[in-house]
Image (tube, grey):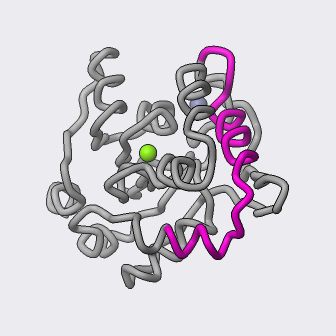
């Protein structure tokens, strides 16, 4: 069975997009927009607006990310299972962390153009999902059974289509509310051992 893993808050300890917004963007805008996702904004719209408020050079942000973004223990054990990372974030901020950690993984993510007048997000797929009504990860991971590992809003729809779900944080709360079974996890070694 394929293994599909979210990046922010799942592989990483904290959501690195949130960390970057706090350091280089507008935390007030994040606080204002985040509660509106799924109400009158799609996740993509939220991300696009928040990163448009960032004007720092990409190299500066990548250097900061490499210094501050931590991954959960067990990434190497998980990497041995050849997971695909599916992220609402950006290749530009994920790949350097993988290199730092010495692991190679397939990554399905968006791209960002770090313009000095505001970052422009290039979304991998902007097609609205037939199930949840907004662009989401489900279509990208379709095509055979998979186990899904995630923590947040971006994982909801794809997790519901998985054979087996590992969840933490707000994804776990969401699944609790729906009465959907999942396996809790704390570090990535837990997941690797459960699947290995
Ligand atoms: Mg996440
Ligand atoms: Zn969906």
From which residue to which does the magenta span run? 39-64
The x and y percentages for residue 55 are 74, 57
**Picture quadrant of residue 131:** top right
Q: Residue at horizontal 20%, vertical 56%?
A: 187
148 lies left or right of 27? left
Q: Residue at horizontal 42%, vertical 37%?
A: 152
**Picture quadrant of residue 77:** bottom left
Secondary structure mostly seen in the magenta stretch? helix
Tell whether position 48 is magenta. Answer: yes
**Picture quadrant of residue 76:** bottom left
1 lies left or right of 114? left
Would you place residue 132 above or below residue 135 in this image? above
The x and y percentages for residue 87 are 54, 52
Q: Is residue 122 visible?
A: no
State which quarter of the image contains the N terminus.
bottom left
Would you place residue 97 above or below residue 42 in this image? below
35 lies left or right of 135? left
State which quarter of the image contains the C terminus.
bottom left
Residues 161 and 64: in front is 64
Residues 146 and 11: in front is 11
Total marks drawn? Answer: 0
The x and y percentages for residue 120 are 79, 53
Would you place residue 49 above or below residue 55 in this image? above
Q: Residue at horizontal 50%, vertical 31%?
A: 157
Q: Is residue 86 visible?
A: yes
Residues 192 and 68: in front is 68
């Amino acid at each position: 069975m394929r293994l599909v893993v979210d990046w922010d808050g799942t592989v990483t300890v904290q959501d690195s997009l949130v960390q970057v917004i706090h350091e280089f963007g507008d935390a007030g805008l994040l606080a204002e927009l985040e509660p509106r996702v799924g109400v009158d904004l799609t996740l993509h719209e939220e991300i696009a607006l928040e990163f448009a408020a960032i004007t720092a050079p990409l190299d500066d942000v990548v250097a900061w990310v490499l210094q501050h973004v931590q991954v959960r223990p067990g990434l190497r054990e998980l990497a041995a299972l050849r997971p695909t990372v599916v992220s609402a974030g950006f290749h530009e901020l994920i790949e350097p962390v993988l290199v730092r950690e010495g692991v190679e993984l397939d990554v399905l993510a968006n791209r960002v153009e770090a313009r000095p007048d505001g970052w422009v997000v290039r979304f991998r797929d902007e097609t609205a999902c037939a199930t949840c009504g907004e662009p989401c990860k489900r279509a990208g991971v379709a095509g055979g059974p998979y186990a899904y590992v995630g923590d947040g809003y971006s994982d909801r729809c794809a997790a519901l289509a998985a054979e087996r779900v590992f969840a933490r944080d707000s994804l776990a709360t969401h699944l609790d509310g729906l009465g959907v079974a999942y396996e809790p996890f704390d570090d990535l070694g837990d997941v690797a051992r459960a699947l290995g």
